[in-house]
């Protein structure tokens, strides 16, 4: 059956309420805004929230500083606590800051001063953008769209980094960002590894929505590497479609490597749903 999203707000329900720290506000157009203002404010008031930054990480996010000193027990405990709080928040309402949080979560066992500085920059970015919200829109759902990207040899051990952003309508739903478990020989291989690891997530989402009665077109994978598309074309065409786009349009780029400037702002806004 056809799945219809209501465009009018039902007055019998509260338009604004908080659940597990997340503030949900239903707008007049039916869209829902998600935010965690008090949660972010508590983190900003910690020792990490002194300075403001325009981006959550710089180009050295994945670099390891051999001269960095390990944190003492109290510092390491505070580091772990703050990173896990940020993980909870970014998984729900702040996908634009997910990449540095995921990286820092791999450093909680033995954090050092370099990791602490990266955390301070992340908290400084949240301080500057504390009012940013996640928007769930009411646009028509036609298909599941997957943006899958990889950065080649971005980690110090030569491993690549995979990223996925799925869209249902104009709302970003599932976000994934992870270090690859191998060191690919070239960028095409890195993209192929990311595609192999992540496309099933979007396919699962498509089948889940269909099980709810949503009528969907064949899902689409967006890729910015033509060689990767050529290698998997025959496989993909059986269950989903693939389309090539320019790297400047690859939204998942913001989760595969640290970006700065206009490119970051554009992709972050798409993930948060604050612009089409």
Image (cartoon, helix red, strand yellow):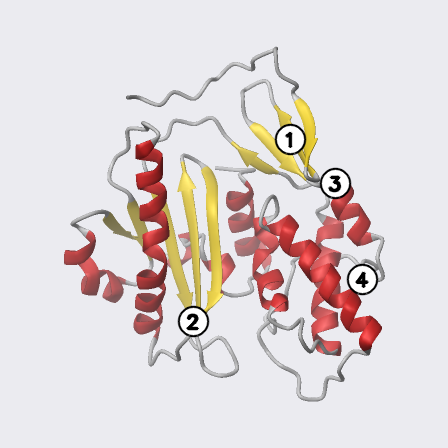
Looking at the rendering, which quadrant does residue 186 occupy?
Answer: bottom left
Q: Is residue 15 above or below residue 40?
A: above
Q: Which labelled disc corresponds to residue 37?
A: 3
Rounded to the nearest angstrom, the CA distance separating label 1 from label 2 is 35 Å
Residue 58, horizontal then vertical, whole percent: 63, 67
- In terms of secondary structure, where does tag 2 sit? loop
Rounded to the nearest angstrom, the CA distance separating label 4 from label 3 is 17 Å
User: Are there few (<14), some (14-19), or many (20+) residues within 10 Å of tag 4?
Assistant: many
- Dot 1 and dot 2 residues touching (CB under 8 Å): no
User: Are there few (<14), some (14-19), or many (20+) residues within 10 Å of tag 2?
Assistant: many
Q: Which labelled disc corresponds to residue 180?
A: 2
The residue beneath circle 4 is: 48
Nearer-N-terminus badge (3/2): 3
- In terms of secondary structure, where does tag 1 sit? strand
Q: Which labelled disc corresponds to residue 24?
A: 1
Rounded to the nearest angstrom, the CA distance separating label 4 from label 2 is 30 Å
Nearer-N-terminus badge (1/4): 1
- Dot 1 and dot 4 residues touching (CB under 8 Å): no
Residue 225 seen in the figure: yes
- Dot 1 and dot 3 residues touching (CB under 8 Å): no
Residue 15, horizontal then vertical, whole percent: 65, 20
Of circles 1 and 4, which is in front?
1
């Amino acid at each position: 059956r056809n799945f219809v999203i209501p465009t009018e707000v039902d007055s019998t329900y509260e338009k604004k309420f908080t659940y597990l720290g997340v503030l949900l506000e239903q707008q007049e157009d039916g869209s829902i805004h998600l935010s965690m203002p008090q949660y972010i404010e508590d983190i900003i008031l910690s020792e990490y929230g002194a300075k403001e930054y325009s981006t959550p990480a710089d180009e050295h996010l994945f670099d390891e500083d051999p001269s960095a000193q390990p944190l003492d027990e109290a510092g390491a405990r505070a580091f772990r606590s703050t990173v896990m709080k940020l993980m909870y928040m970014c998984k729900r309402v702040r996908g634009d800051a997910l990449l540095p949080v995921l990286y820092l979560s791999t450093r909680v066992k033995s954090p050092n001063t370099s990791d602490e500085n990266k955390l301070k920059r992340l908290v400084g970015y949240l301080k500057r953008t504390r009012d940013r919200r996640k928007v769930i829109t009411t646009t028509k759902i036609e298909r599941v769209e997957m943006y899958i990207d990889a950065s080649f040899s971005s980690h110090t051990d030569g491993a690549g980094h995979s990223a996925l952003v799925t869209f249902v309508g104009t709302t970003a739903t599932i976000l994934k960002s992870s270090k690859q478990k191998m060191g690919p020989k070239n960028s095409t291989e890195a993209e192929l590894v990311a595609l192999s690891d992540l496309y099933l997530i979007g396919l699962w989402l498509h089948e889940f929505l269909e099980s709810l009665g949503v009528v969907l077109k064949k899902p689409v994978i967006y890729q910015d590497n033509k060689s990767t598309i050529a290698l998997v074309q025959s496989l993909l065409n059986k269950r989903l479609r693939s389309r090539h786009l320019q790297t400047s349009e690859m939204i998942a780029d913001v989760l595969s490597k640290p970006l700065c400037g206009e490119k970051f702002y554009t992709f972050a806004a798409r993930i948060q749903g604050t612009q089409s």
